[in-house]
Image (cartoon, rainbow, N blue to C red):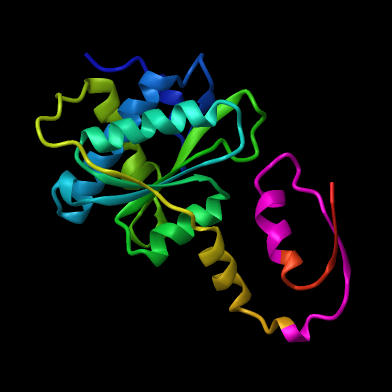
Amino acid sequence: MGTLAPPEIFKAYDVRGLYGDQIDGDVAEQVGRAFVRVLAEQAGKQPADLRLGLGRDMRLTAPELAARYRQGMTAEGADVLDAGMVGTEMLYFLVGSRGLDGGLMCTASHNPKAYTGAKLVREGSIALSGDTGIQDIRRLVETGLPEPDGPVGSVEEVDVTSAFHEAALGFIDPANVRPLKVVVDGGNGMAGPMVGPLLERLGLDLVQT
């Protein structure tokens, strides 16, 4: 029997719903498992051959749900590089820069704090959409996944911050940045902790709110 996951959480470009009412730990784990199976089929690989990135935003529910996504992914045999609390673009950078087979970002983007969800990408940080994988994940979750019978995948905790900053600074010549006073309002999101340290390296007069 499949997990009771409301079909409406499977959107055109992500998985998103209310924490507890629509998405809980059990749903997250099943989504993680189904994600691995769909990626493996798309890539023509065995699930155990996949290397996947994982990240989460600052929501209070994110540590619990990211752990359950990770549990589902490794249960299917995939190896997971866990970047912890990062911006979505940093998770995408991890997938692209390390040549991973895909990645999952535990986030509900701009939705209020009561929401949670997942953004899903394949190799090259190309997003899954409703007709390129998300509805396949929905069908697997709804119909029920057979218990995996292979070895559990590994987990490696990684820090992608420095590499991301170096890559971002590589697009400009810091010496040409004139003195500025910059105000950063992260809007209760990951932009503040991500961009603040980056701007500090440019010698700017930085005000964070």
Q: Is residue 146 visible?
A: yes
Residue for point 20% across, 48% down = 40
> Of 19 and 98, which appears nearest the observer?
98
In the image, residue 194 lies in the stretch drawn in magenta: yes
Q: Residue 69, position in %: x, y?
A: 37, 33
**Residue 177's spot in the image, x, y percent?**
79, 80
Q: Farthest residue toward the left?
A: 149
Residue under the image location 74 percent in, 65 percent down: 199
Please indicate whether residue 56 sits to the left or right of residue 128 in the image: right
**Image-based side of 150 in relation to 166, left or right:** left
Which quarter of the rendering shows the N terminus?
top left
Q: Quadrant of residue 73?
A: top left
Residue 116 place in picture, x, y as percent: 54, 29
Choose between 22 and 52: the one closer to the eye. 52
Residue 194 sits in which quadrant? bottom right
Which segment is the magenta one? 175-198
Residue 62, placed above or below residue 161? above
Residue at point 32% right, 58% down?
100
Does any portion of residue 12 appear in the rendered image? no
Which of these two is toward me, 193 or 87?
193
